[in-house]
Amino acid sequence: MYDAEKTIIAPRSVTTTTKGGDKPMDIEKNDDMWTPPQKPHEPNLTIGIHDAEIVDIEGKRGVPNQFNENKPRDIYIVTFAVSTPGEGNFEVKRTITNSSAPKSTLSKWAKALGFGDISVTGFRGYDLIGKPCRVYIKHGEPTENGSIWDRVDDVLGPEQATLKRPSNTLDDLANDPS
C-alpha cells in the first residue's frame, strides 16, 4: 500500500552506455529532483472584455525596482475573479505600483471604479476588494517554455462598455484597408 509519508523521492540516477556498449558511463543528477517535462500553459480566456470582480489585493513594500535598483517600490498584486459564459471562472493576477499619481495604473483603475481623483482624495488599495468591474484580457508574451498566460490589460467600471485601446494593435493592422 502507498504511504506518502514513508515514500522517499531520490535523485535520478541514470546509467548509459556509449554506442556499441563498450564503456558504461554513470551520470548522477544530484543537484535537483527529476520532474517529468510539462507541456506549456495555454490561456484560459479569450482576448477581450470580460465581467470580473476584484477578490484580493496583496500589498508589498520595498520591492526591487527593475528600472532603478536604488529606489525600491511598493506594489499591489491584484487578483480578479473573471467569469465568462462558456469559458468558466478563472483568477487572473496583475501587479501594479502603489502610486496615486494621476497617470498611474492604480489611479486610472480607481477612477473607473468610481473613486474619483485619488491624488487629491487619498486612497487605500484594499478599498477595491469586492468591486465588480470589467477587464480587458490580453495574452502575455510566451515564456521560455512556451507558456502563454492571461493578462489583465485594463480595468473598466461595471457599466462601461467601451475601452480605449492603443492603436497599431494586431486587430487594427488586420483591418487596415491599405
Image: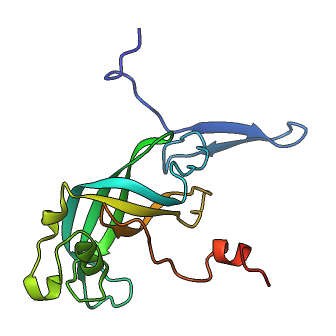
Q: Quadrant of residue 67?
A: bottom left
Left or right for 12, reference 91: right
Nearest the viewer among 84 and 162 is: 162
Of the 4 image quadrants, the one containing the N terminus is top left
Left or right for 58, reference 163: left
Q: Is residue 132 above or below residue 27?
A: below
Residue at the outermost left position: 121
User: Residue 87, percent across and down?
Assistant: 50, 42
At x 48%, y 57%, the residue is 150
User: Residue 146, percent across and down?
Assistant: 62, 57
Nearest the viewer among 37 and 47 is: 47
Of the 4 image quadrants, the one containing the C terminus is bottom right
Q: How is the image coloured?
A: rainbow
Residue at the outermost top position: 1
At x 22%, y 55%, the residue is 56
Q: Quadrant of residue 139?
A: bottom right
